[in-house]
Amino acid sequence: MEMISGLLSYTIAKVLLLSGLSNRNNARKSKKMEEKALEVYDIIRTVRDPEKPNTLEELDVVSEDSVEVQEIDEDEYLIIIRFTPTVPHCSLATLIGIGHIHG
């Protein structure tokens, strides 16, 4: 009985690993998405506000936590950037919020 239980456990672990449902695979994928999010953040944090001499990072418009990357396909990603306008009544916030880039 113990041998059958061990064999069943091994088989289930292999199926999960091959199907992409294992924790190890998910952790690897999650780490990859975190790295991509940091790459995006490194690019956008240095963008300067056209009305001020500061970067978006210095103004607390964006932070590391405000960038999320989700894999859609092998070479296709959804990038979500949450930003905080410098003033609540920012007239460009809606325009910035609906902007998107295809690459």
Image (cartoon, rainbow, N blue to C red):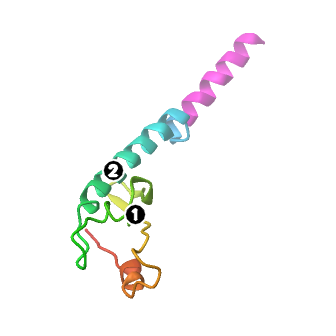
Is residue 45 positioned above or below 94 on the image?
A: above
Q: CA distance from mark 2 to mark 1?
A: 14 Å
92 w.r.t. 31: above or below: below
The N terminus: image quadrant: top right
Quarter of the figure with residue 46: bottom left
Q: Residue furthest front?
A: 53
Which mark is drawn over residue 78?
A: 1
Q: Range of the magenta residues?
A: 1-16
Residue at the farthest right position? 1
Question: Could you tell whether 19 is left or right of 8 in the image?
Answer: left
Secondary structure mostly seen in the magenta stretch: helix
Q: Three-letter amino acid code at disc 1? A: Leu
Q: Is residue 4 magenta?
A: yes
Mark 2: few/some/many CA within 10 Å (<14, 14-19, 20+): some
**Residue 6: quarter of image:** top right
Where does residue 56 sit, x and y in percent of width and height? 31, 65
Residue 3 rendering spot, x and y as whole percentages: 70, 11
How busy is the neighbourhood of tag 1: few (under 14 within 10 Å), some, or many (20 plus)? few
> Residue at the location (29% across, 72% down)?
102
Q: Which residue is mark 2?
A: 38
- In the figure, 43 relative to 31: above or below? below
Residue name at image x 40 percent, y 47 percent: 34
- Compare residues 81 and 7 and report the one nearer the observer: 81
